[in-house]
Image (spheres, rainbow, N blue to C red):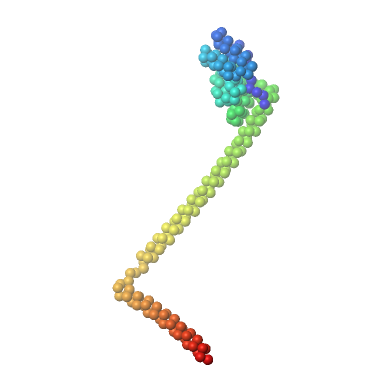
Amino acid sequence: MRKFICIVMVLCLSGSAFAQKADLRRGNRQFKKGEYAQADISYRKALMQDTSSVAAHYNLAGNLYRQENYDEAAKQLDASQLTAGEETFAADYYYNRGDVAMAQQDWQTAVNMFKESLRRNPGDMDAKENYIYARNKLMEQQQNQDQDQNQNQDQQQNQDQDQQQDQNQDQNQDQNQDQQQQQQQQQPELNPQQAQQLLQAIQDKEKQTQEKVDEKKAQALKSRQKEKNW
């Protein structure tokens, strides 16, 4: 993948004052030496004298790219505002913008920018390779997003099913409670005489049961005594 291109020639297209040109030349010399912090200061001084300078924005973007400040590099490139007079450098401008987008993993922007670069310079093999790479990454990203969306939908469906089951269980419990209450309400209340008769019947039943138990115990005792006397 080709590195970001800093077009020093943009300087000569600028109608800036002498002081601004001096700052730009100084920044370009510092950039070539790898003195990026100093170059940053020089390019920003040039911008203070002419905020619309294509050269200052453009070369500052290249300097920021070297320092891996991709977000700010993108802003400076967008601010360079290439005009029809600078169409000669448009292919490299769009290539650099695509290069920054790739560093940001903004694959859609990268694809668009490399496509624009190839429209202006169809023979640029680096731009073609980067375009294909960014396009593949974009497709991969879209597939992952589709998979994540499907997983989220499945999870949501499972949650909805669980909630529906819980609601059904709650409804069944409420219905059972209502039925029990209705049954209790439907049972007739006993008057004192009926209640006394019911209690007497229960006591008689218990007495009969106890008598049977006592009788069985007595028979068992007699049987053991006979065996012992024999």
Residue 107 visible, this angle: yes
In the picture, residue 79 is in which quadrant? top right
Question: What residue do we see at 52% from left, 12% from top?
Answer: 49
The answer to whether 141 appears left or right of 203 in the picture is: right
Q: Looking at the rendering, in which quadrant would you find the N terminus?
A: top right
For this rendering, which residue is in front, 84 or 34? 34
Residue 172 rendering spot, x and y as whole percentages: 45, 58
Q: Residue at x 36, y 65 (%)?
A: 185
Most distant residue in the top direction: 18
Residue 112, given in percent of the width and then of the height, sits at: 60, 27
Q: Is residue 211 left or right of residue 66?
A: left
The part of the image, by quadrant, that contains residue 44 is top right
Residue farthest bottom in this picture:
230
**Tally of marks:** 0
Where residue 127 appears, x then y in whole percent? 66, 25
Please tell me which residue lies in front, 41 or 59.
Answer: 41
User: Where's residue 214, x and y in %?
Assistant: 43, 82
Q: Give me the residue at 40% from left, 78% from top.
A: 206
Q: Between residues 100 and 26, which one lies in front from this camera angle?
A: 26
The image quadrant that residue 189 belongs to is: bottom left
With respect to residue 165, does 229 lie above or below?
below
Residue 229 to residue 61: above or below: below
Q: Is residue 74 visible?
A: no
Residue 147 lies, with reference to residue 190, above or below; the image says: above
